[in-house]
Structure formats: C-alpha cells, structure tokens
Amino acid sequence: MAELFEKLTMYLQYPFVRYAFIVGVLIALCSSLLGVTLVLKRFSFIGDGLSHVAFGAMAIAAVAGLTNEMPLVLVITVISAVLLLRTGQNTKIKGDAAVAMISVGALAIGYLLMNIFSKSSNLSGDVCSTLFGSTSILTLTKTEVWFSAIFSLLVIAVFIFFYNKIFSVTFDESFARATGIKAGLYNLIIAVVIAVIIVLAMNLVGSLLITALVIFPALSAMRVFKSFKAVTICSAAFSVSCALLGILISILAGTPVGSTIVAVDIVGFFIFFTAGSLKGGVKR
Amino acid sequence: MSLLTCRDLSLGYDGNVILKGLSFSVESGDYLCIVGENGSGKSTLMKTILGLLAPFGGSIRTGDGLQPDEIGYLPQQTVVQKDFPASVWEIVLSGCGNRMGLRPFYNKEEKRIARENIERMGLTPLIKRCYRELSGGQQQRVLLARALCATKKMILLDEPVSGLDPKVTSGMYALIEDLNKSDGITVIMISHDIGAAAKYADHILHIGDGYFFGTKDEYLKSDMYRGFFKGGESDG
Ligand SMILES: Nc1ncnc2c1ncn2[C@@H]1O[C@H](COP(=O)(O)OP(=O)(O)OP(=O)(O)O)[C@@H](O)[C@H]1O
Ligand SMILES: [Mg+2]
C-alpha cells in the first residue's frame, strides 16, 4: 500500500501527470452533462455516428501530417453534426439510414486512408489508439492539453447557460416549439456541443468507447434520482469520480486509460443499479 | 384585425388530406370550442395552428400583435419517454420558458407564476414528485399548470378535462372561464363535452363531414348540431 502511495506521489510530481488528471476530469465532467439528453432523445444515434466521423477525420488529419489534429477533427465533426441533424429531421427512417451510412463509411475510409498513406511503422497501434484511446493520456502534447481544457470549460459554460432550454427541448419539444421557444436553434446547439464533447472524449477513451463515457453516468444517475437537476448533478459527480479512479488505476497498474475508466463506469453502474432497485423495492 | 384568421386551410399528415377548405377567425377574448368525432382532425388542426405541422394549403394569419411566445398549449398526449427524470416543479416551471428569451435562468416572477399555477391545480403536495410516477389525472394537471404558465394572450387546450375527476373538472371549467372573462385570455378548446361547450363557449367550430363555424346560438339551431346528437343517440 505504502509502495503504491509512493509511486503515486512520484508520478504526481511530473507536471504532465497533473495535466492528465485535470484534462481527464474536465472531459469526464462535460461528457456526462448531455448524457440524459442523449439517452432520451433520438440524439443517441447521432452521437454514435459522430464518433465514427471523428475517427475518419482523425485519419485524414494524420494522413495530411498535421501536428495538431484537433482543430480539423473538431471542424469536420461539428459540420457532420449539423448535417446529420438536418437529415434526421426529415423522416425517421431516412435519418437513421443516413447516420448508419455516414458512420460506417467514415470508419472504412478512415482505416483505408491510414493504411494507404501512413508513414508510421506501427499502423495497427495507431489505429488501435484512435479507436480505444491512447495507451495513456500522459502522451498528450501541451497544445492538446490546453485545447482540451479550454473547450471543456466552454462546453460546461454553454451547458449551464442553456440548461433550462435544454430541459424544455429534451422533455417536450412540441410544447417548446408551440409556445415560441426556438427549438431548432437549441437542437443545433445541443448537436454542436455533442460534437465538441466527442472530439474531446476521443483523447481520453478513443472513438469506440466515447458512448460509454457519455451514457453510463446518466443511466446510473437515472436509476437513483428522479429530477432532471439531481440526475445531472449526480451523473457529473459519478463521471468525475470514475475518471479519477480510472486514471489512478491505469497509472498504477499500467492499464490503458480509456478502457480502465469505462470498466470503472461499468462497476459504478451496477452499484447504482442495485441501489436503485433497493430504494424502489422499499418504496413499493 | 382578428387575433387568428384561417383561410381555406387544408391540412393532414404525410400528404393525406384530413380537412380542407376550412375558414374561420378568432377575435381577442373569444372562447372557441372545437367539437367533432374521434379522428375528425381536431388535434391536427390545433397542431397546424401552432405551427407544429405545415398546412398543405391556405393561410393562417395572426393579428393584434400576437406572438408565438404568448400562447399556452395543452397537448392531448405527451409522449414522455418512460425513464425521463423530471419533477413536477421542473415541468411546470418549464412552461415559463417562453417568458425568458435568452436569459439563462428563471427569475423570481416566473417562479412565482409557476408556484401559483401549481397551487391552482392542487399539486402543491406533489411538487417534488417525479412526473412519470404520477397517476394519469395528476399528470394531466401538471401539463395544465405548465400550459397556464406559458399563457399570456391565448391558450389552446386539447381535451383539457379528459382523465380528471368530476370535482377537478368543474374547477377546471371555472378556471378557464375566469381566465377568459377576467384576464381577457382567448381560449380555443377541443372538447367532447358538448354540454360544457354549450355552457361556456361563445363560438363553436364543429368538424365532421364538412364543417360548421359560428356563434354558439347559431350552432345550437344548426343541422350539424342536431345531426351530431341524433347520430350519438342511434349509436348508443
Ligand atoms: N402522427 C400521425 N401520422 C399520421 N396520421 C395521423 C397522425 N396523427 C393522427 N393521424 C390521423 O389523422 C386523423 C385525425 O387525427 P386527429 O388526432 O386530429 O383526430 P382528433 O379529431 O383529434 O380525434 P380525437 O377526438 O380522437 O382526439 C386520424 O384519422 C388519424 O388517424
Ligand atoms: Mg385529438
């Protein structure tokens, strides 16, 4: 035990380890915020599609030899989010099909591009880290750290500012629209924020595991709490705790960060699931 | 100019016309009841008036400076996802959403309005409860309180008393009448309760095979009214 503690204090002396913690916590926090909206609105499929788009964009950025891939990935993902929202509004079936096409298409093209143009000797390693997150977020460059921190704070600010509108639009879009709330605008804002979150979360857990980071906190909190505010606060706390614990374990045990965090999320979900059933059982 | 004017309106879903050639107008302070059989297109008409559905043809014009954010709405059915976490307070307060423009948080006045409407609907003891764990009638009252919060000039109610017990129903009618008479709020209400329509409304829109629009007195003398009742009697 003391040995572990010593190891940890040693690690924490490095600034990049501290950065990793800060960035990890911020990303975990903002990815949990829109969880309820994503789970309960048809946005969940957009979220899934977008993570694949982000993967494709990452491949393009890598092929183009950009040193900092994030701005390009961000722009492509945000544009796709807006487009997907547009097509999704026409009719349900067409929208779903469009998302499926775009997401598998992006995945295939992304891998193809990486395969053809990659100069790296470790191709499968590259692909793997884009899909499942870097083996450790300790490898983030300083620019990436700043980028992630600034955009996370931005997402949190936007979420707080539009919190009440997001509730209205998520709970009952028809009512919001009928009573003169600009539901289209807020849907757009939600889609853009989701895109930003996905790009941020890619750094932490990779594009395949993003959905887990977004959905587990919300699903867990919904087991126990019954108001939107309580669920939002609880899922934020849940996500941050799981991320902290996950990063800690991954540093000490040398496991991959992304999957460790998701594993912790899963354990957390089962704890909340049980707690929810017990609580419900007592009431009934 | 009228508060709301519909001219030669045709409407429906996905290219299927349900109603066509509908023209009527609503003046400020009117109390209009829309009646008709199940599936005749009453709810569809209301959604079209609110801009939730695009009409196939004709025009809907608002006048007297009526803005979309001055309208309250009670939908017939609200599809709320099974697990949605939302308390009574959060839902009723969200009715004030159209009052706040870009401002991020509700102010004291809006919270007061929400509290008042919760009280009016007798929901105060349930204020912290989760919406989806309420009974059908209680849920209906929550949505009514929300609609009242959103109302400034006009309220559209799609079967407001369905699922309410007799006591709450009569309270509800009294409340709507009071809104209409004392606050001058224009009421458009869909109802199957012909008795109440005849008692409270001043105008009737009857949709069926063709349509009737006019004052209540004209309606009570019309063939459509008699036909509606005869049909009802021979069915039962
Ligand atoms: N979402 C929808 N998509 C396609 N058709 C619909 C939809 N909703 C209703 N309809 C059809 O439109 C017609 C009119 O429906 P509407 O809900 O307006 O009837 P209504 O007059 O309100 O009836 P009720 O008294 O039962 O509430 C019905 O024939 C119905 O089948
Ligand atoms: Mg109806």
Image (cartoon, rainbow, N blue to C red):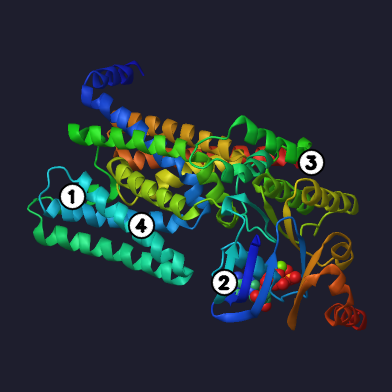
Residue B208 showing in the rendered view: no
Please name whichever residue, B124 or A257, is drawn nearer the observer in this view of the structure.
B124
Give the labeled residue for mark 2: B59
Q: Are marks 2 and 3 on the same chain?
A: yes
Q: Amino acid at mark 1?
A: Asp
Report ligand 1 position as a quadrant: bottom right
Q: CA distance from mark 2 to mark 3?
A: 36 Å
Give the labeled residue for mark 1: A126
- Chain label for disc 1: A
- Chain label for disc 2: B
- Chain label for disc 4: A
Circle 4: element type: helix
Residue sitting farthest toward the front? B1
Q: Is mark 2 within 8 Å of ligand 1?
A: no
Q: CA distance from mark 3 to mark 4?
A: 42 Å
Expressed as whole percent of the image width and height from the top left, the position of residue B224 reads 83, 80
Nearer the camera: disc 3 or disc 4 = 3
Nearer the camera: disc 2 or disc 4 = 2
* Crowd class of label 1 (few under 14; some 14 to 19; many from 20; radius 10 Å): some
Q: Amino acid at mark 3?
A: Arg
Please name whichever residue, B44 or B142, is drawn nearer the observer in this view of the structure.
B44
Evaluate if marks 2 and 3 touch, with contact meaning CB atoms under 8 Å apart: no
Q: Amino acid at mark 4?
A: Val
Pick the quarter of the image with the N terminus of chain A. Answer: top left
Evaluate if marks 3 and 4 touch, with contact meaning CB atoms under 8 Å apart: no
Nearer the camera: disc 1 or disc 4 = 4
Q: Are marks 1 and 4 on the same chain?
A: yes
Tag shown at residue A82: 4
Pick the quarter of the image with the C terminus of chain A. Answer: top right
Give the labeled residue for mark 3: B120
Nearer the camera: disc 2 or disc 3 = 2
